[in-house]
Image (cartoon, rainbow, N blue to C red):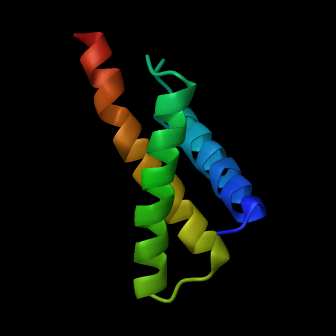
Amino acid sequence: MHVSGLFSGLFAAVVVGALGRLVVRDRAPIGCLLTVLIGLVGAGVGLAIGAALHWGFWLTFAAQVIVAALLVLPFTRLQQR
């Protein structure tokens, strides 16, 4: 794996995780590291869905953000209790 590929993957994870947090709208009590981890998982699952259904870039990106938002949701619900 190239270093540039690693950095671009981490950057994509940060973007997807941050957008996932923005979609939820509640204050998510998670830090930067958990945002990156949620972004990585959301990006991976969204990419798998997009590749399986032969979606283009924008639909796949939307799927990644939606998956990340669904992963952020339990953390906001736990904080509300």
Q: Nearer the viewer, residue 68 or 12?
A: 12
Screen quadrant of the N terminus: bottom right
- Residue 26 is left or right of residue 80, and the answer is right
Residue at x 78%, y 61% (from the top left corner) = 4
Screen quadrant of the C terminus: top left
Examine the rendered structure and indicate whether residue 27 appears above or below residue 61: above
Examine the rendered structure and indicate whether residue 40 appears above or below residue 30: below
- Residue 77 is left or right of residue 7, and the answer is left
Can residue 18 be seen here?
yes
- Residue 30 is left or right of residue 3, and the answer is left
The residue sitting at the left extreme is 81
Can residue 66 be seen here?
no
Q: Nearer the viewer, residue 72 or 33?
A: 33
Which percent across, then down, holds residue 60? 55, 71
**How many discs appear?**
0
Residue at x 57%, y 34% (from the top left corner) = 22
The residue sitting at the right extreme is 4
- Name the quadrant containing residue 67: bottom left
Which percent across, then down, holds residue 40? 50, 51
Which percent across, then down, holds residue 13? 59, 49
Residue at x 45%, y 42% (from the top left corner) = 38
Examine the rendered structure and indicate whether residue 1 appears above or below residue 28: below
Residue at x 51%, y 34% (from the top left corner) = 35
- Residue 20 is left or right of residue 74, and the answer is right
Q: Nearer the viewer, residue 47 or 10?
A: 10
Examine the rendered structure and indicate whether residue 21 appears above or below residue 14: above
Which percent across, then down, holds residue 39? 51, 47
